Image (cartoon, grey):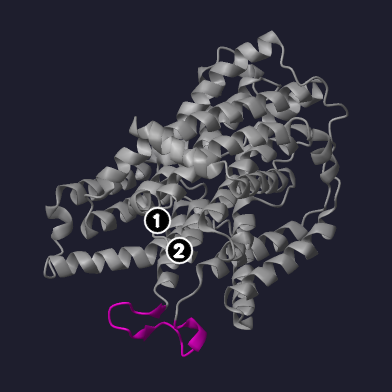
Amino acid sequence: MELLHNLYIGFGVAFTPENLFYAFLGCLLGTLVGVLPGLGPVPTIAMLLPITYVLPPIAGLIMLAGIYYGAQYGGSTTAILVNLPGETSSVVTTLDGHAMAKNGRAGAALAIAALASFFAGSVATLLLAAFAAPLAEVAFKFGPAEYFSLMVLGLVGAVVLASGSLIKAICMILLGLLLGMVGTDVNSGVARFDFGVPELQDGIDFAIVAMGVFGFAEIMSNLEDSGEQGDVAVAVGSLYPNKQEFKEAWPAAVRGTALGSLLGILPGGGAVLSSFASYTLEKKISKHPERFGKGHPAGVAGPEAANNAGAQTSFIPLLTLGIPGNAVMALMVGAMTIHNIQPGPQVMASHPDLFWGLIASMWIGNLMLVVLNLPLIGIWVKLLKVPYRILFPAILVFCTIGVYSLNYNSFDIFTTACFGIVGYIWSKLKCEGAPLLLGLVLGPMMEENFRRALLLSRGSYFTFLERPLSASLLGAALILVLIVASPSIRKKREETFVEE
């Protein structure tokens, strides 16, 4: 009954005209950045962070969340019609989605992707509502030692589940932790690592790093491309899957939902890992694996369900424990801190309207996205013909205005440009920016809880092992490290992220 009462509060908040408008705006922008290759939810949310200064907290978070899960829907459109994944999590959708389009079943593939996404998003939202409250109750029992150990586990999980080199992911996290130490020490009040630059005494602004590494660097990377948008399928055709396609798609959608929901909760999980893992699972359990890559409906339904479920359940550790599991959740932490809201279990008690309103808006947003993605396919196809050379100046100007509006200081623009150049170099070296962002967000929180734990234990480092929950979390982190160090596990991990 309490859950129903909370959902009643949430839908009451979400159904206000203002919040419905921002939910629709977020879903529309998410679909747009998902459709257009070269854009994505991370740089888009990074660019829009300054706007949340002038929006009510609930409206701002609803809009940003809509961009994230909306991009998962939009990314499938280009993957199916053009064989270009508009979003990273849609990479595997190109394998069977575009093959279905070439076989004259583009409309059926789009419908399967949209319906699987809606089903997965709806189920994941229910899981978020059901498990958020119990997890938040458990989180209230956490002390500084437990929070520190949980953040260690989160960072280790982000390394283990990150695509690419483990060594590079570890280096990026360590660099993020170091950047988080720049500024005035909270305990002593002494400025550190500011190199005598007054603008750095308050630390490096999270939004500046995000916009540089993901916004400016993405623009530079995309300008290298030839600009060819690919061949759009000649005719979309009927949007109704036939009986055989539906029969093959719905079990994959159910499995993808379950797998994505689980992986989304894990630190470092989310939409990308979920979609790759789902495709691998479907191919391995199929009686006809040779059909994959040639237009198998399960190869569309499974990954699309998984990436949407993973995108929405990744809000669970953020809202209940205050721990961001991926780059987008780290940006959501930034949006919450802008409004002086500390993410974690206290959000449910101190801001129940925000907590439950955000959850309710996700279900409404999923419904909006079905409407946006099926009847408006013609509009999205036309947008694919817009050359990137026309888009990027507007994106760059918008980024620059957003950076300047943070503190009305031109120093921030130059800092963002520097991070953009460095981020571009990192992309060339195959170094992911997401671990850096997680390290930057969690670093100050880890340091604060580490010091608190030592103060309470009178300087004893054994406090992290003497407390059972803290020791269990550190043990889990150690086990993860040992598992991923195994050559066989490392090989399977690499295979999971390789396009077939």
Q: Quadrant of the N terminus?
A: top left
User: Between disc 1 and disc 2, whose residue precedes?
Assistant: 2
Q: Main secondary structure of the magenta part?
A: loop
Give the residue drawn at x 74%, y 38%: 78
Q: Quadrant of the C terminus?
A: top right
Does residue 24 appear in the picture of this structure?
Answer: yes
Q: Quadrant of residue 368?
A: top right
The residue sitting at the top extreme is 243
Q: Eyeballing the image, is 463 above or below 248?
A: below
Left or right position of 351 against 426: left
Left or right position of 385 against 39: right
> What distance separates the C-alpha of mark 1 from that of mark 2?
8 Å
Magenta stretch: give its range.
183-201
Residue 317 is one of the magenta-drawn residues = no
Q: Which is nearer the eye, 119 or 5?
A: 5
Q: Which mark is residue 152?
A: none
Q: Which residue is mark 1?
A: 343
Q: Which mark is residue 337?
A: 2
Disc 2 secondary structure class = helix
Left or right position of 456 against 95: left
Q: Which is nearer the eye, 259 or 10?
A: 10
Percent position of residue 489, x then y: 40, 37
Count of marks overlaid on the render: 2
Give the residue drawn at x 60%, y 35%: 366
Give the residue drawn at x 31%, y 41%: 135
